[in-house]
Image (cartoon, helix red, strand yellow):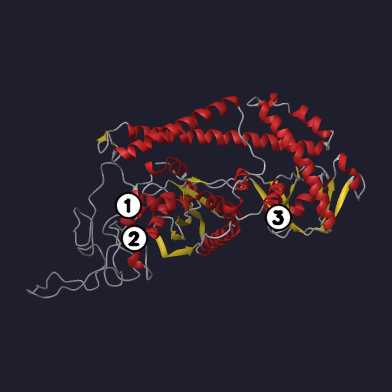
């Protein structure tokens, strides 16, 4: 089982503001984006033809000199950098797909080798010959895909579609996508625009190509040489008639541009809404986050969260791994367009961070979920029949990667730490050991997801999930028990341990004790008084507010 670890803080920041352009400014930006986009696609094609080579052999300087003649030195640098990043990203995607195909082929191959309806060495064969034949056909398809992928990796020629492969597929089925040819063309052209200017430390306001004045919010853009006749400002620059002013993290942005630190700007167009946006991004200093061991040693509380379809189950866990107070349920309706889903997810994470701050938690504990392998292999690992289909739909409705990334950034800005744990058996063991005790001390309905959140929190703090039996009473006002350490047993020297004492167990040895139950007696019984048959003995137990007797000599 993998140990818990602290999720790293975000390495950068990105903010956005809307550009309310006039028609003349919109035409200039469209011409600029199309001009730079054309040369960016040409450079990307050249980079793909070069293939997998060392960094010093990718001929970036040569390609940059050729692009400088049709743009500028800074535009050419941004284009060649974007081409290299896109090429490396596509190669990583090929490697990930190859690993996924190899896992699927190995899993199906093991089951195909076993006769139908039998089990050999823990591997179960398929139920009937028809299913086995279908899997053999799928195995041949996956093997062919893997061979093609291996050849592409060997040649170093990934398939890249500027504008998106999904949009290309929609062109062949416009009716199914609910688009007209004109609407599709607008989206296609907008996705292929290139309006990205890399930041430069020491340049005016952190970026010479696209500059934003923090005083009045004016935006000026350096035009390439073929478009210099459109300039309306000195030195071949074009000044937009609109202004921008970043509200979110605006003070941080102002501090950077005032100090002439590097800030990257991206201008994008959304044809669906008919809007233009300006994004500003920059790198942030690497923050050192405390490890789970340091959180445990410091006595920190954690808000443990269990991600589920439609809701988030949470519970506060104290430094000793015990649940505190009532469990929480944060509902998430992740349906509708992508923008609405993202907004609802952010609202749910905001509620989690508010709960963590309210209850004095130092961070949040989540599961290190990732269903990529399971999605690739499919029914081989995610069940068969109706139950497996339901489980696969459940997995498809859980935004594990997006939830983790959103939580990482928002928790960092709120001053909270995020700890990820191994998700193995948290639901099963949590329901087995913690659902009933949680229900006893809670007035609301406790589900297995709340119990799983307790298991997640205990694992994040380094404790086991199992409880010590016979510790928690149903109602401490009615049932009196001896207070014992639930999760913090005191270490003893090896060979000197004694069996645990319970209420009513006398001491063995010369230790003094006020009563046989090792507690302060409410009504001590004199040894001279003779008990009569059937008489009720006075109750003995700890007085409210007094600490339990540890049996130590005074």
Categorize mark 3 by other alpha carbons within 10 Å: few (<14), some (14-19), many (20+).
some
For the C terminus, give its image quadrant. bottom left
Of badges 1 and 2, nearer the viewer stands 2
On screen, 95 above or below 353? above
- Residue at (78% x, 60% y) in the render: 20
Q: Which residue is mark 1?
A: 466
Q: Earlier in the sequence, mark 1 or mark 2?
A: 2
Q: Are marks 2 and 3 in contact (CB under 8 Å)?
A: no
> Which residue sits at x=83%, y=37%?
72
Estimate the spatial distance between the alpha carbons at disc 2 and disc 3, rounded to whole Å. 50 Å
- Reading the image, the residue beneath label 2 is 435
**Residue 301 image position (x, y, % from top left):** 47, 57
In the structure shown, which secondary structural element does the residue marked by tag 1 occupy?
loop
Q: CA distance from mark 1 to mark 2?
A: 12 Å
Pointer 3: what residue?
Answer: 271
Q: CA distance from mark 1 to mark 3?
A: 55 Å
Report whether 464 appears left or right of 141. left
- Which of discs 1 and 3 lies nearer the camera? The answer is 3
């Amino acid at each position: 089982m993998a140990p818990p670890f602290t999720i790293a803080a975000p390495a950068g920041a990105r903010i956005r503001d809307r550009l309310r352009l006039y028609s003349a400014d919109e035409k200039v930006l469209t011409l600029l984006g199309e001009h730079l986009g054309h040369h960016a696609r040409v450079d990307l094609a050249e980079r793909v033809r070069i293939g997998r080579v060392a960094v010093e052999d990718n001929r970036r300087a040569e390609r940059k000199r050729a692009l400088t003649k049709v743009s500028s030195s800074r535009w050419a640098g941004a284009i060649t950098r974007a081409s290299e990043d896109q090429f490396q990203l596509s190669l990583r995607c090929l490697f990930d797909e190859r690993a996924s195909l190899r896992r699927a082929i190995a899993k199906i191959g093991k089951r195909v080798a076993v006769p139908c309806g039998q089990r050999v060495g823990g591997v179960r064969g398929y139920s009937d010959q028809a299913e086995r034949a279908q899997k053999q056909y799928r195995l041949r398809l996956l093997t062919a895909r893997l061979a093609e992928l291996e050849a592409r990796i060997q040649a170093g020629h990934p398939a890249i579609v500027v504008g998106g492969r999904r949009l290309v597929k929609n062109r062949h089925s416009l009716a199914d996508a609910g688009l007209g040819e004109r609407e599709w063309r607008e989206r296609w052209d907008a996705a292929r625009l290139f309006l990205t200017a890399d930041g430069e430390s020491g340049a005016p306001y952190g970026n010479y190509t696209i500059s934003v004045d923090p005083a009045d919010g004016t935006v000026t853009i350096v035009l390439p040489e073929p478009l210099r006749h459109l300039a309306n400002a000195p030195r071949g620059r074009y000044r937009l008639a609109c202004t921008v002013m970043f509200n979110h993290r605006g003070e941080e942005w102002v501090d950077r541009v005032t100090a002439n630190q590097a800030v990257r700007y991206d201008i994008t167009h959304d044809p669906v809404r008919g809007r233009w946006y300006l994004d500003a991004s920059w790198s942030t200093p690497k923050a050192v986050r405390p490890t789970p061991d340091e959180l445990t040693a410091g006595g920190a509380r954690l808000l443990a969260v269990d991600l589920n379809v439609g809701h988030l189950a949470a519970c506060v866990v104290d430094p000793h791994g015990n649940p505190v107070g009532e469990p929480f349920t944060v509902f998430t309706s992740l349906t509708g367009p992508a923008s609405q889903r993202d907004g609802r997810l952010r609202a749910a994470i905001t509620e989690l961070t508010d709960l963590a701050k309210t209850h004095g938690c130092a961070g949040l504990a989540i599961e290190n979920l990732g269903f990529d392998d399971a999605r690739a292999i499919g029914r081989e690992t995610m069940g068969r029949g109706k139950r497996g289909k339901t489980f696969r739909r459940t997995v498809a409705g859980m935004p594990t990667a997006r939830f983790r990334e959103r939580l990482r950034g928002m928790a960092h800005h709120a001053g909270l730490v995020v700890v990820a744990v191994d998700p193995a058996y948290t639901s099963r063991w949590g329901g087995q050991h913690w659902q009933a005790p949680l229900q006893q001390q809670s007035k609301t309905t406790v589900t297995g997801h709340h119990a799983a959140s307790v298991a997640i929190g205990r694992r994040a703090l380094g404790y086991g999930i199992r409880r010590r039996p016979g510790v928690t009473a149903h109602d401490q006002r009615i049932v009196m028990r001896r207070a014992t350490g639930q999760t913090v047993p005191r270490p003893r020297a090896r060979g000197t341990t004694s069996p645990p004492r319970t209420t009513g167990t006398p001491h063995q040895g010369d230790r003094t004790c006020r009563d046989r139950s090792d507690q302060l007696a409410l009504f001590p019984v004199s040894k001279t008084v003779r008990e009569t048959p059937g008489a009720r003995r006075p109750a003995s137990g700890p007085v409210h507010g007094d600490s339990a007797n540890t049996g130590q000599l005074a």
